[in-house]
Image (spheres, grey):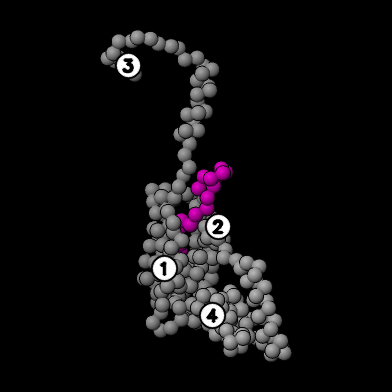
Amino acid sequence: MAIKIEKKIVKYSVVKDEEKATAAPAEESTAAKVVQMHEKLERPEVLIGSTYKIKTPLTEHALYVTVNDVVLNPGTDDELRRPFEVFINSKNMDHFQWIVALTRIISAVFRKGGDVTFLVEELRSVFDPRGGYFKKGGKYMPSLVAEIGDVIERHMRMIGLLKDDTLDEHQKKLINEKRAEFESMLHKAEDSESGSFPSGAQLCGKCNTKAMIKMDNCMTCLNCGDSKCG
């Protein structure tokens, strides 16, 4: 392609092959950019994911929640695994419309990029006017939508998008002491509907587990260590 030179040439130099070879890697490194999650990212042919089973007393059939992830910048130091889409399947067709709408909205938020962890709290704050239910282990679920949010939270923790909230050594020691003291008062450990916690335990407002007992005139949770006395 011919290029018309409008200005007078004052000087020039010839680029040698060695200089081209040294300049090429620098240009390539500049051109190489870290890929972030955004809505224009095309869906790969193959995605990795996990499927979670939800069985609640509100529905006759189980729900299967599949979360597929996309791997960004594979093989580099900036490799990230991020949720890309959600599918929910069930034999029960009663909730078909809102489930399809929910999966499309969640998938759209995932593909938008940015901080998507807010979805967990938004879903878990949905309450069923007919009342919620207790999962195995004593954790309270206010609605079916909230349990879908709980599944997404578990998946985000699994891929490293959310960090686990672990108890420190002092909290673990306090819980063990309170549990041992309470069991010694009863002379034996009692199983209850909440699983491994004593019968008569109340619902903890912090971890939603029926593990709150009264010790030394103070309500203390045997699951997360929350105490009404500070």
Q: Is residue 132 left or right of residue 176?
A: left
Mark 2 or 3: in front is 2
Residue 139 in which image quadrant? bottom right
Q: CA distance from mark 3 to mark 1?
A: 60 Å
Q: Earlier in the sequence, mark 2 or mark 3?
A: 3
- In the rendered image, is residue 88 in sight? no
Q: CA distance from mark 3 to mark 4?
A: 82 Å
In the depicted structure, whether residue 129 falls above or below residue 87: below
Callout 4 amino acid: Lys
Q: Position of residue 150 (x, y in %)?
A: 50, 69
Q: CA distance from mark 2 to mark 3?
A: 54 Å
Q: CA distance from mark 4 to mark 2?
A: 32 Å
Q: Quadrant of the C terminus?
A: bottom right
Q: Earlier in the sequence, mark 1 or mark 4?
A: 1
80, 229: nearer the viewer: 229
Q: Earlier in the sequence, mark 1 or mark 2?
A: 1
Mark 1 touches mark 2? (CB < 8 Å): no
Asked which secondary structure carries label 2, the reply is loop
Mark 2 touches mark 3? (CB < 8 Å): no
Q: Is residue 38 left or right of residue 74?
A: left
Mark 1 or 4: in front is 4
Which residue is denoted by mark 4 in the rendering?
228
Q: Position of residue 57 (x, y in %)?
A: 50, 82
Is the residue marked by circle 3 packed among few (<14), some (14-19), or many (20+) residues within 10 Å? few
Which residue is denoted by mark 3 in the rendering?
2
Give the residue drawn at x 41%, y 79%.
Answer: 128
Is the residue marked by circle 4 packed among few (<14), some (14-19), or many (20+) residues within 10 Å? few
Q: Earlier in the sequence, mark 3 or mark 4?
A: 3
Specify the segment rendered in magenta: 72-87
Residue 124 in which image quadrant? bottom left
Which residue is denoted by mark 2 in the rendering?
160
Callout 2 amino acid: Gly
